[in-house]
Amino acid sequence: MRLAATPPNGLSDAEAAARLAVDGPNVLQRDRPASFLRSVFDVLREPMLLLLVAAGAIYLVLGDREEALTLLASVIVVVGIAIVQERKTERALAALRDLSSPRAAVIRGGEKKRIPGRDVVRGDLLVLEEGDRIAADARLVECAHLEVDESLLSGESVPVRKRVRSDETAEPRPGGDDQPFVYAGTLIVRGHGLAEVRATAERTEMGRIGAALAELESGKSPLQQEVARIVRTVAVLGLAACVALIVVYGLTRGDWLQGVLAGIAMAMAVLPEEFPVVLTVFMALGAWRLSKSRVLARRLPAVETLGSATVLCSDKTGTLTENRMRVARLWSRGGLHVVGDDPLPESVHETVEFGVLASQRDPFDPMEQAFHRLARAKLAGTEHVHDEWELVREYPLSPELLSVSHVWRSPDGEQLVVAAKGAPEAIADVCHLGPTAAAEIRAHVAEMGADGLRVLAVARASFGAAALPAGQHDFDFELVGLVGLEDPVRTGVPAAVAECAAAGVRVVMITGDSPDTARAIARQVGLATEASVITGKELEELSDDELAERVQRASVFARVVPEQKLRLVQALRARGEVVAMTGDGVNDAPALKAAHIGVAMGGRGTDVAREAAALVVTDDDFTSIVGAVRQGRKLYDNLRRAMAYVVAVHVPAAGLSLLPVLLGWPLMLFPIHIVFLELLIDPACSLAFEAEPEAPDTMRRPPRRVGASLFDRRLLVVSLLQGLGLLLVSLGVFGWELAQSGDEGRARTLAFAALIAGNVALILVNRSWSQSVVASLAAKNVAAWIVILGASTTLVVALAVPFVRDLFSFAPVSPNEVLLAAVFGAASLAWFELAKLARPAWLVRA
C-alpha cells in the first residue's frame, strides 16, 4: 500500500540522542590505522631486520663508522619502502570508504530529516526511496512497489520484492521475495516505503558477518617463515665460525688483533643480511608494480603467495559478471532473436516498445534499465519510441499478480494504450491464453531459463472507456512476446579463465544465484560443468569428509550462503590447496579472510570485504586478478634467482676469508672488501633481479608444489657449485701471484678483480637458468646494467685512485693484468653456460 498522508511521528531528537548514547554510532568497527612510529616498530621487529640493525651497531662499537653507517642506511631504505607502500594503500582504501558512506532519511518528531547514517538508532523510522542505500536493518511499516537489490548480502543478482506482513515474527536471511525486512547496505531499486529500525552497527546482518572475521587470524606467509628460519640458522653458524676463526688465528699466529679482523670479515661474509633486504624489497616493489595495474596490496606477502595459488574461488555477481542486466533474447510470434550488434528484426520491435512502456521513465530497476538501453540503441528515431506520451495510471505488481501495467495517452490518440510486463505465468493469466498457447509459452520460458536467463513476458491492450478498471484483469490484453535478460559476463573473463586453466589454477564459482543461472554463466566463462552443480542445500547435508571429496571435482556452487562459502574455502585448504578468494560483498568477507589470499573488488566492494582482503582490485576487473597471479609467479621466479645469486656470492666471500688463514697465507679480504661486495652489489642485485622480465612460460606451467622450499636442494647445489668455481679461481689467482711476486698487495688486487668479474658473471648467468647469456641480453633490464656498470666503475676507481687503493690495501698493477684476472673470474662460470646448452631437466625446471 501507499504511504499515509500523515506519517507517524517517529522518535523525538532527545529519544534518538539517548539511544545513540546507549547503542553507539551506526558504524562497523574497523582497525585503526597504525601510527607512523608503530608502523616503523612493526617493520623493525622482524628478526631479519633486527640482524641488520645489530650488525650495524656492532661495527659502530668497533669504530668502523663508514661500514656501520652504510649498513644502517640500508635499514632506513628498507623501512622507508615498506612504510610508503603501506600508507599509500591505506589512503586509497580510506578514499574508497568515504565514497561508500551512506546518509539516511528519517522521520523524527513528525518531520522528515536527512541525517548521517552513523546517527541512525533503533526505533527510527527510515524513509525508503528509490535509489537509496539502506542504513540499518529494519522492518517495513508501509511500502509501495518496493524492490531491493540484496546482492551484497545474498549474492543474488536479481532484486527481490518486499511487502508489509504481520505474520512474520522470525527475521529470515536476506534474499527471497515478499519478506517484510530490509537490511543495511542494500539498495532500493524500485518503489518507496517506511520501515522501523530494528538493528544498527554490529547487530545488523552486515555487522554479524563482519564480526565473524575476528575469529579468522592470518599469520606470516610460509616464505617469510622459511627465510626467517634460514637467517637464524646461518647467523648462528656464521657467529660460531667467526669465533672459531679468531681462536685459530690467535693460537697459530699469536696475533689476536689480526685474528679479530679476520673474524669480523668472516662474520660479514657469512651473515645473511641480504636475505631480508632482498625479500622485503621484492615484496615492496612487487606491490608497487601491482598498484600500477590497479591492484592494491594490503599485506605484502600476498603478492608472492598469489603466484602459488592452485584454486581461485570467485563470486559470480559483480566479479565474473557486470552486475548489470542486459536483454539477451527476444521472442515473438515471428520467432526467436538473439540480441547482438545487428539491427532488431521488425517482429520483435513491439516487444521492446511495450517493455519500455511498462517500465518507469527513469528507472532504478536493473531490468527496466536494460529495456531502456536496448530501445535507445536499436529503436531510436523510430515510431516505437514515445517520449511525448503521458502516463495516466500505473497498476503495481502485487503478490497475487506478478505483473505491472502502465496506461498511456498519446498526444493524438483517442484510445488509451496499456502496456504490461511481468512473470510469464502472470501475463499468460491476464491474456487469458488457452491451454495450447500457454504450453507453448512455458516451453519457450523453460528453454531460456535453462540458459540462466531471467524471463519476462510483455503484453498490450487498448482501452477507450472513460473510467479505468480497478484491476489489470479487466483489460483485453494480447501477448506481445518474451524477453530473456542476463547479467552479462565481463569482457575478458573467458580468456582469463582459460589462462588460469593453462597455468594449472582451477577456477571455482561460488554464488547465491540459482543452479541454472550458475551453470549458464559457467559455460560462458569456460568453467568445467561436467560435474553436477552443488547447491547450498546439498552442502548442508555433506559431512566434512564428503565435502572434501566433492570439492575436488566440482567447479560450480549455487544457492550458497556466507557460512557455506567460508566452509568451502576451509575444505579446499584442508585438501592442501592454496586458495585465492575474490569477492565484493559483505557475504564474501569471512571467506576472503579465511583464504590464503583474499581479493576484494574496490569499486563496488564493501568496506567489510576490503578490510578482510589482502589484495584490493580497484577496477573490479577479474582479469586484473590473473595479471596479479602472473606478477606473483614472476616475483617468485626472480626471487629464486636473486637468492641463488646471494648464496653463490657468499661462498667465495667466506672461503677467501677463511682459507688463506688455514693455508698460512696473508689475509686476502678485510671488512671493507666484504662491505663492498655486500652493500654495493648484493642489495643492488635484488633490484636487478626483481626487474627481470617474466619467462615466456610463466602462465603455461602448473603452480609450484605446496610446501616447496625456496631454498630447495637444486637451488643450493647449483649456487654452491657456482660459488665454489669462483672461489677456486680467485684463490688460485691470489696464490699464483703470491708465488710469482711475493707481493701481498698485488695478489690481493688481482684476486679481487677476478672476484668482482666473477660476481658480474654471476648476475648475467643467473638472469635465466634456461637461456644463454647472449639470449638473455635481448630481454630489457636496465637495473641489471646499472648494477654492473656501478660495480665496474667502483672497481676501476679502487684500482686507479691512490687514496681509495690504499683504503682497500691494493697495489698498482697493469691494465692487462687486471683484464686477465677478470677473464679468469668470468670464465669460472663457463660450465654453467655449457649446462644450459645441454638443457638437463634439473636445470630447465628452475
Image (spheres, grey):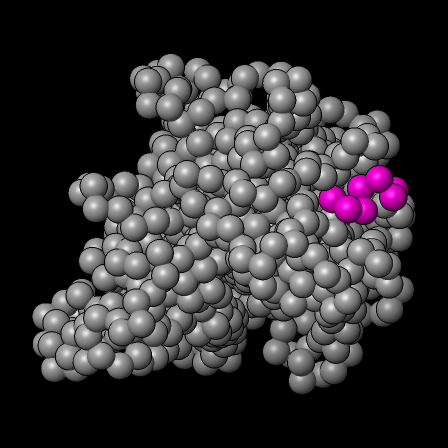
Is residue 347 part of the magenta span, yes or no? yes
Residue 120 is situated, as x and y percent measured from the top left of the image, at: 25, 71
In the image, residue 468 above or below residue 18 = above
Residue 306 is situated, as x and y percent measured from the top left of the image, at: 55, 44
For the point 26% across and 58% down, the residue is 141
Is residue 378 part of the magenta span, yes or no? no
- Quadrant (top left, top right, bottom left, bottom right) of the C terminus: top right
Residue range (magenta): 345-351
In the image, residue 498 above or below residue 286 = above
Observer-nearest residue: 327 or 380? Answer: 380
In the image, residue 162 above or below residue 672 = above
* Secondary structure, magenta segment, majority class: helix
Drawn side of residue 788 relative to residue 276, left or right: right
Residue 573 is situated, as x and y percent measured from the top left of the image, at: 41, 31
Drawn side of residue 520 relative to residue 498, left or right: left
Drawn side of residue 835 relative to residue 743, left or right: right
Observer-nearest residue: 457 or 207? Answer: 457
- Quadrant (top left, top right, bottom left, bottom right) of the N terminus: bottom left
Say whether residue 461 is visible: yes
For the point 75% across and 34% down, the residue is 331
Q: Where on the picture, by quarter, is residue 359?
A: bottom right
Residue 96 is situated, as x and y percent measured from the top left of the image, at: 48, 69
For the point 68% across and 38% down, the residue is 478
* Numbered label tally: 0
In the image, residue 688 above or below residue 554 = below
Observer-nearest residue: 372 or 681? Answer: 372
Observer-nearest residue: 60 or 597? Answer: 597
